[in-house]
Image: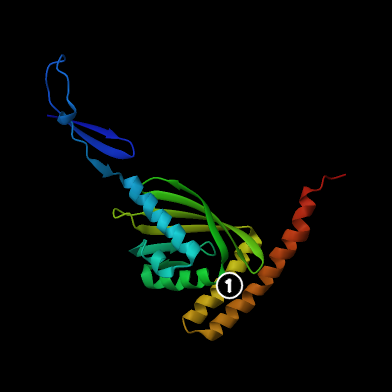
Amino acid sequence: MEQCISAKRFITLSLVSCFSESTLLSSESVLTVEVVMPVARAESTSLRYREAGEAKDLDALIATLAPDVVFHSPLSARARFAGHRQMRELFGVALNVLGGLRYHTDVGDERTRMLASSAHLNGQELEESTLLRLNDEALIAEITMWIRPLPALTAVMAALGPGLAQAAGKPVLSALVGAAVKPLILMTRVGDRTLVPLLDKPSG
């Protein structure tokens, strides 16, 4: 018997009797077994992650994450979250403050997925890119996120920082973070609305 493997989206195992070239193969001599490829598992995980985010379903989102998952924040290289407990706190606040989250792009392979989405926060439109790295069980082991434009990034900082401090039972820290971020929000919005357009105007 000869095993013939065709690896496209599914693996097809064909058991073929070895006869002379003149021998015709009957349909009974071929057995086909479909096995889901790893990339399909990754696509399924990514789909569940996206659907959970759009539906604000925190439990469903956490179910896509590995127990030792690590999140790299777009706000600071020092901001790092790990494990289900911290991820539940982080995404609990994020899903509560973000509105209209919609994913429009999902590309990658069985180990890496790249997502792109749009949302809004306090009247500020934002775009988000998310890099997902998956483990052998097709669970998300690492998340790295980027947000644009700059006014949107500072708006997210203003919402998440105080929210996380409040969730941790630190109301004083929440107030301090909120006060510290307000000047950044003002500067980035003023710069985006007044200074950046000046760069587009031709000189002379």
Furthest toward the right, the residue is: 204
Residue nearer the viewer, 2 or 28: 28
- The answer to whether 74 appears left or right of 48 in the picture is right
Residue 200: x and y in percent read 77, 48
Residue 37: x and y in percent read 30, 44
For mark 1, give the secondary structure: helix
Residue at 54% x, 58% y: name it: 102
Residue at 54% x, 64% y: name it: 75
- The answer to whether 18 appears left or right of 35 in the picture is left
Quarter location, residue 88:
bottom left
* The N terminus, quarter of image: top left
Badge 1 crowding class, 10 Å Cα cut-off, few under 14, some 14 to 19, many 20 or more, is many
Residue nearer the viewer, 130 or 42: 42
Q: Is residue 20 visible?
A: yes
Furthest toward the front, the residue is: 27
Q: Is residue 171 above or below residue 128?
A: below
Q: Is residue 87 visible?
A: no
Residue nearer the viewer, 14 or 184: 14
- The answer to whether 196 appears left or right of 89 in the picture is right
Residue nearer the viewer, 110 or 68: 110
Residue 122: x and y in percent read 64, 69
